[in-house]
Image (cartoon, rainbow, N blue to C red):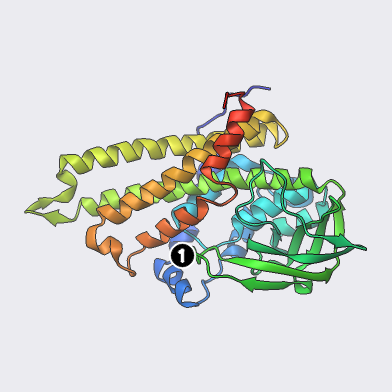
Amino acid sequence: MSLTPQLLNTDVEDDLRAAVRDLLEKRVAPSDLIAAYDGTPVPAIDGELAEMGVAGLLVPEDLGGAGAGAAVAGVAAEELGAACAATDFLTSAGIATATALAAGASVLASRLATGERSAALVVPFSADPHGPAPTVPVVDGALSGTVRSVAGAIGAEVLLVPGSDGALYAVPASDTRIEPVSSLDMTRQLADVVLDGARGDVLTADGAAAIRAGLLTGAALLAAEQAGVARWCVSTTVAYLKERRQFGRVVGGFQALKHRLAELYADVESASAAARSAVVTLAELGPEDPESVIAVAVAAAYCSDLAVRAADEAVQLHGGIGMTWEAPVHLYLKRAKADQIGLGTAGRHRAALAGLIDLPA
C-alpha cells in the first residue's frame, strides 16, 4: 500500500508540542543534566508527562491511552530531543509500549499508558529492527543470562525479555540484577541486565514479531528525537552568533558562517521531514507494512548522522565557550553520538533499505 504522508502538523499536535515545550522549559535545566555526570540524579519529569497523557500516546483509548498514534508521539519525541531531556519516554512509552501492544499484552499496555508502570525491552540499545534480537536462554521456564547495554532498564519496573524459545516474557525488574554502566550520554544511562533463573509471564509465543514492532517504533521516535537535537543546535548557534562579536562586528555577519548555517538549516528541515514521514507512515500503515519499514530506515539513517554534524557544528561555532563543561552544547553532542548507534547505525539502516527497495549491491 502506498501513502502520501501528511507532513504538516495538526492543531492537536501543535497544542501538544506547546504543552510539552512549556513543561520542559520549566522543569529541565541544563545545570541539572550536567550534574548527572557527577552522579547527581536528574529531577524526574516522567510523572508529569504521564499526567499530560504523553506516556499513553501509542495506547488505544479503550486501554486507557490517548489513542494518538506514532505521528503524535513523534512530536513529543522531537521536543524531548530539543531539550535533551532525561526521560524514559523512548524506552517505556515508545519501545516497550509498542512491543506490549504487538504482543497483545493489553493489561501491561494500560498500566504503561497511565504511568502506573514503566518498562524496558531487554535488548542492547544498539539492536535494530532489521534482524533477529538477542535472546536469553530459557531452561524449564527460567531465564538465565546477561544482556549488556540496555537502555531504560534503570528505574523500569517490568522488563520485557526475549527468550531463546521464541517467547517474550514480562519479568519483574526486582527479580533481576541491573548493573549501571558508564555511558557517554548520562541523561540516557545504559545498564547490564543479569537474569539468574528469573521467571516471568509469557506475553506471546511469537516474540520476534512483537520485538520488531517495538524496535521499529523506537527507531522512528529516535529519528524524531535526533531531529529535535539538530534543531536545537542550529537555533541556539544562530542566536549565539548574533550576539558574539569579533574584529568589531557580529560574528554571524561573516559570509562563510552564513553559508555553513544556511546549509545546515536546510538539512535540519529535511531531517524533520524525514522523521515526520516515518512516524506518519508508521501510524497509518502499521509496523508490518514494508512502506513503514522503508520510511523508518530512511529517517533513521539520515537523522542519525545529521544530529551529530549539527552538534559538532554547534560546538565549533560557539568558539571557546562551546568547549567548556558549563555550556550545555556538550550535552547535545553526547546525546547525538550515543543515539548514532542506538537502534541501529546509519549504515545498518542503509543496508536494510537497499534490500527493501531492491537496490543492487
- Residue at 65% of width from left, 69% of height from top? 155
Q: Is residue 68 visible?
A: no
Nearer to us in this view, 91 or 27: 91
Q: Quadrant of the C terminus?
A: top right
- Quarter of the view holding residue 212: top right
Location of residue 108 with respect to 6 vertically, above or below: below
| Left or right: where 32 falls relative to 296 | left
In the picture as drawn, the residue positioned furthest to the right comes out as 140
Q: Is residue 264 visible?
A: yes
Nearer to us in this view, 236 or 358: 358
- How many labels sit on residues? 1
- Residue at 83% of width from left, 69% of height from top? 198
Nearer to us in this view, 81 or 114: 81
Q: Which amino acid does label 1 sit on?
A: Val
Residue 360, percent from left and from top: 57, 23
Q: Mark 1 highlights which residue?
A: 28
Nearer to us in this view, 165 or 52: 165
Residue 111, percent from left and from top: 76, 59
Residue 341, percent from left and from top: 53, 51
- Residue at 60% of width from left, 45% of height from top? 219
Q: In which quarter of the image is the N terminus?
A: top right
- Residue at 68% of width from left, 66% of height from top? 156
Q: What element carries label 1?
A: loop
Location of residue 303 with respect to 334 vertically, above or below: above
In the picture as drawn, the residue positioned furthest to the left comes out as 248
| Left or right: where 267 falls relative to 132 | left
Q: How crowded is mark 1: few (under 14 residues within 10 Å), some or many (20 or more)?
A: many
Residue 90, percent from left and from top: 60, 54
